[in-house]
Image (cartoon, rainbow, N blue to C red):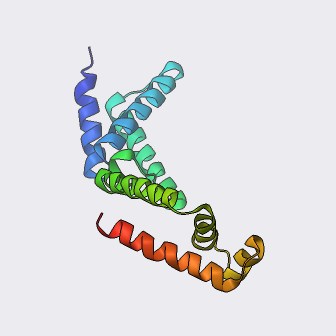
Amino acid sequence: MKDWASVFRAVKGALMRRGRTEHDADDLVQDAWIRFDSYQRDHTVDDPDAFLMKVALNLSIDMHRGRRAHGDEVTLEDVVIIDTSPPAEDVLQARERTERLGLFLGRLTAKTRDMFLAHRFEGMTYKEIARQHGVSVSTVEKHVARASVQLTAWMEGW
C-alpha cells in the first residue's frame, strides 16, 4: 500500500520552499491530488510521486502568474482589522452631553429655543430667522447670544 501521507508532505514541503504559504501549499496538494486521481482513471501513471509533484508545481506556477496578472488575493489572516468606533467612554460622555443639552434646551423659552436651534443647527441666517418669526434681526441676535451664553455656563461645570 502506498504511503500517500509522506508523498503529500514532500510535495507540500517543496511548495513551501518555493515561497507558498502553508495554506496555499495544502490547497495545491489537494488540487494536484484531484487532477492525479482523475488522470489515472484513464491513463497509466508510471511514477505517481513524480506526477503529483509536477502537477502541484505547475499549479503553483499558474497561481503565481494569476496573482501577478490579477493582484494578490487577501486572506483574512493577512488583514489587520482596525476598529474605528470611538471608545465606550467617549460614547457614554457624548450621550450624557446630549442629555444635558436637551435639559438646557428645555429650560429656554420656546422663542429663544427656536431661534437658537434655527441658527446653530439648521444654519439659518439671522435675517431668515427674523423674517420667519416676524421680529428684527437685532432681536434674533439677542436671543441667540443669550442662549449661547447660558449654554456655555450650563455646560461649563459639567
Apparent side of residue 144 relative to residue 135 in the rendered image (left or right): left
- Residue 26 x, y percent position in the rendering: 33, 36
* Residue 82 appears anywhere in the view: no
Apparent side of residue 108 relative to residue 12 in the rendered image (left or right): right
The quarter of the rendered structure image containing the C terminus is bottom left
Farthest residue toward the bottom? 138
- Of residues 80 and 33, which is closer to you in this image? 80
Seen at 39% across and 31% down, the residue is: 30
Apparent side of residue 154 relative to residue 141 in the rendered image (left or right): left
Seen at 25% across and 50% down, the residue is: 17
* Residue 28 appears anywhere in the view: yes
- Residue 120 x, y percent position in the rendering: 57, 72
- Residue 72 x, y percent position in the rendering: 45, 56
Seen at 46% across and 49% down, the residue is: 63
Image quadrant in which you'd find residue 139: bottom right
- Residue 78 x, y percent position in the rendering: 34, 52
Image quadrant in which you'd find residue 126: bottom right
